[in-house]
Every structure is written in C-alpha cells, then in structure tokens.
Amino acid sequence: MEEIQLSRGQFLRQLGMSSAALMSFYCLGTSMTACTSASDDPTPTTPTTPTTPAGNVDTGITGSTTGTIDFTIDLTHKDFKKLKTEGEFTYVADIIIANAKGTIVALSKICTHQGSTIDFRGGTGDFKCPNHGSEFTSTGKVQKDPAVKALQAYKVESLNSGNSLKITG
C-alpha cells in the first residue's frame, strides 16, 4: 500500500476545518510537528470522572431521578427556591419542572418530535421546542406540531407547607 504524505494544511482541510481554525494551528509555530511522522501517534488517555467533596453533598434532591421517578425537591434550597415564583422553571435529570401560573408542573424535557430539550414560556405558561417549534400545554398535550405525541407528565405533590415537592411517575 502506497503511503500518502499530506502537508499540515491539506490534512486539516480534509478534516473540514475552517480557515480561522487552520490559522490558529499555523500560529502555534514550532510546537506543532508535521503530520507524517510515525512517532506523532497520540497516546490514548483515560477520561477522568469529576470528583465530589467527601461527605454528604446537599443537592436539594432526594430519591430517584432516573428509572422509576420518585424524588423530592427542597424548595428552600438555593437551586430550587425560584420555583416558588410564577413563570420560573428548572431541569432535574430528564424532567422540566415549572411554575405555570401558580401551579407546579413536571414534564419530560425531551421533545417527542426529535428529542430536543424543551423550554418553558412563563408568559403563556406553556412549553416550546426551540428547534422545530412544537408547543405543549402545561399538561404535556401537543398544541402545535410537528410533534404529535404528548410529553410525559409526572405527578407533583406539595409537602412540608409548600417547602418541598414530591415528583413521581
């Protein structure tokens, strides 16, 4: 098999890099070597897992956010106290939780059209996919296509005098 040697620019163009990206590589100067040396093969690295501090980390969530959904959110926690305000929302795992005109709702955050993450519109109290414009009611029902299947809705229960939310489904 005949070995083909490419210049650095030819190699990068074949990768589809823009001229701006190419210029940044050229500006690296002598720290970059030609792409034709057999010794340039990169050494594989093992991805690292982020470490968490020792002890209990207060996330404001207890329970299961995957598989069988059954978790509780502490609405006094800094990450979730905004949910007490009408028009606010947050994501927890694959769920969007929103204060839709005074009612807390929890739906799948994954658009049923092509899997994009939906957004909450506080002014109208509904949900919209930013990619193709599908719209959903606060119960998850499709109100504008191209999506044809409703979002999964989860049961929301207020606990502890409104200071906690239990999400199940």
Image: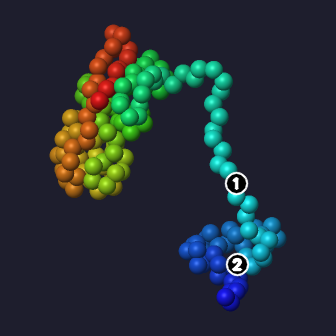
- Residue 75 position, x and y percent, is 41, 19
Residue at 22 percent across and 39 percent down: it is 140
Rendered view: 52 above or below 25: above
Query: What element does badge 1 sit on?
Result: loop
Q: Mark 2 vs mark 1: which is more N-terminal?
A: 2
In the rendered image, the vertical position of residue 84 relative to residue 108, given as above or below: above
Q: Nearer the viewer, residue 29 or 65?
A: 65
Residue at (31%, 26%) from the top-left corner? 168
User: Image quadrant of residue 68?
Assistant: top left
Residue 151 bears which disc, if any?
none
Q: Nearer the viewer, residue 30 or 86?
A: 30
Q: Secondary structure at mark 2?
A: helix
* Residue 137 at x, y percent in the picture: 20, 39
Query: Toward the viewer: 47 or 133?
Result: 47
Residue 101 in the image: state x and y as whole percent. 24, 28
Callout 1 amino acid? Thr
Q: Residues within 10 Å of mark 1 (few under 14, many from 20)?
A: few
Q: Is residue 13 left or right of residue 164?
A: right
> Nearer the viewer's eye, disc 2 or disc 1?
1
Q: Residue at x 67, y 72 (%)?
A: 23
Where residue 113 appears, as percent x and y from the top left, is 27, 53
Residue designated by label 1: 45
Disc 2 packing (10 Å; few <14; some 14–19; many ≥20): some
- Residue 6 appears in the figure: yes
Give, as a three-letter code, the residue at label 2. Arg
Judged from this view, the residue extending furthest toward the right is: 30
Name the residue: 33% across, 45% down.
110
**Quadrant hosting residue 56:** top right
Q: Which residue is mark 2?
A: 8
Up-down: is 10 above or below 33?
Answer: below
Left or right side of 161 for 74: right
Q: Is residue 134 above or below residue 7?
A: above
